[in-house]
Amino acid sequence: MSEEGRFSLEMLVSNLPIGLATAVAGALAIFAAFHFDRETLSKIPELFDVNIGYDNQLRATADSRAKSTKGLAVTLVDVDDAAIQKWSSVTRTTPRDQIAALIEKLRTKKPKLIFIDFDLSGDASDAGDEQLKKVLAAYPQDAPPLLLTRSLEPIPCRDGECESYKKCPPPEATPPAGKLPEGKPAAEKPRTIFESSAGKANIIWVASVFSPDGDGVVRSGRLWEGVCRNGEPLLLPSPALVATALADKDAAGMACLSAFLGRHGKTDLPATGECKKSWPVNESAYAELVPFIIGGPSQTRISDWLSANELRYQRVRATSVLDQVHDEQVAPSAFADRVVLVGASYGPDKFETPLGVLPGVAVIANSVAVAPVVLDVPPRHISRAILALLLGIIYISVAKPFRALPAAVIIFALSYGWFLVSPYIYLSAADAVNVLSKSLGLLAVFLAIESLLEIAIDWYKGKGIRALMRTRHEPGEA
């Protein structure tokens, strides 16, 4: 019980009009939700750009989350400065014959899948392009899935709804049959890289696009992109979405992926088999936060946790893969049954993230590694945050005037009543527990602030260690 005339948060709130008291509770709820459930509030663009405390949380917990996250094991084959100096020091671009050589070598190492993070548009007819086309055309059907990326004209989309979904420009006019502009017969026209991979069920074109927030920091990624191909709108999956589908042992891989994207638009993914379950759990997922756990490709081996249930991330130099002597020094476990990402750390493709500036392929490595965990969480709606706010206000308003024991009984009764009422507002048991936990979190934050304030005032008044004790009335005091 507070002393007479003593200032406390309880007295402050009790003397406020109900509107201001609600505003105080609301501010505390937003603060608590931002720290404990930022993913819900990220659906509000105005709050999403604020990012209060989120980056600090990621940095502080990156190591512990990396060791406990049951994600996908990832290996980055890094085309670094040493590789580009050796292969193409003048143009500072990765030659496509080296990309072809990496694909040929890596597919023999039995990875879960291979992703090439190099834009394969802009077809040319030099020897490197021809070598890459031959490798793709001859890619075995029993080889690991190969993910390729290509820049295409995007369709404006927001929250998974494409605003200009039926407004693709018509395809560019093709030369009449018989003669090409340069005088070659049409039959001799070289095949494009896209055409070289046509008909291969295990070669999948993907879109790896990351859009920074208002402060220029990348914190989320999209699971698919709407693009225009040959004048038609099409949905391309992200590497993270494909990797999760292929890693799901209970789902029919590509069939479930094709069915999931098919609910949102047209796709040309091969639908082999039948998807017999609802996949993923978060069926409404589109733009999802990336809980970064990989800090960057600055070391040969970022981490090496041996437990099969813990995420492992490794980096191997691209030159080591193609060099026979160095390749033998890399353990086979660095590639076997892992997601292998081939990308560059030497170029300008870099992004500001909560863990610092990372190459684009390292951002993709983060999204791929945690995608199964992200997609395994049921969709969250802002209505839960509102319900948690309202229930938290009720807890504070009703329980605060009472001592601890009656307050606990009242809170228990209110919580029991909440579980009885929640089915009538179409909330699942998991949703009801989620709302309840956030409401109790609000009450805990409120009580913690009040207690800290009272301790600080008593300490300032010279009570010293007694400021930590429960307040008692002195003899003769009213």
Image (cartoon, rainbow, N blue to C red):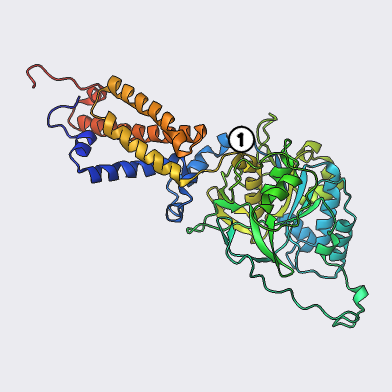
Q: Residue furthest top?
A: 475
Q: Quadrant of residue 439?
A: top left
Q: Residue furthest left?
A: 476
What's the residue at 85%, 46% (across, down)?
Answer: 143
What's the residue at 67%, 32% (across, down)?
Answer: 305
What's the residue at 82%, 50% (across, down)?
Answer: 202
Pick whichever, 341 or 140, lies toward us.
Answer: 140
On screen, residue 418 above or below 48: above
Q: Is residue 451 left or right of residue 161?
A: left
Q: Position of residue 22 (x, y in %)?
A: 28, 43
Q: Secondary structure at mark 1?
A: loop
Q: Quadrant of the C terminus?
A: top left
Pick whichever, 283 or 468, lies toward us.
Answer: 283
Q: Quadrant of the N terminus?
A: top left
Which residue bears the numbered disc 1? 69
Q: Position of residue 135 (x, y in %)?
A: 87, 57
Q: What's under tag 1, amino acid-wise?
A: Thr
Pick whichever, 296 or 41, lies toward us.
Answer: 41
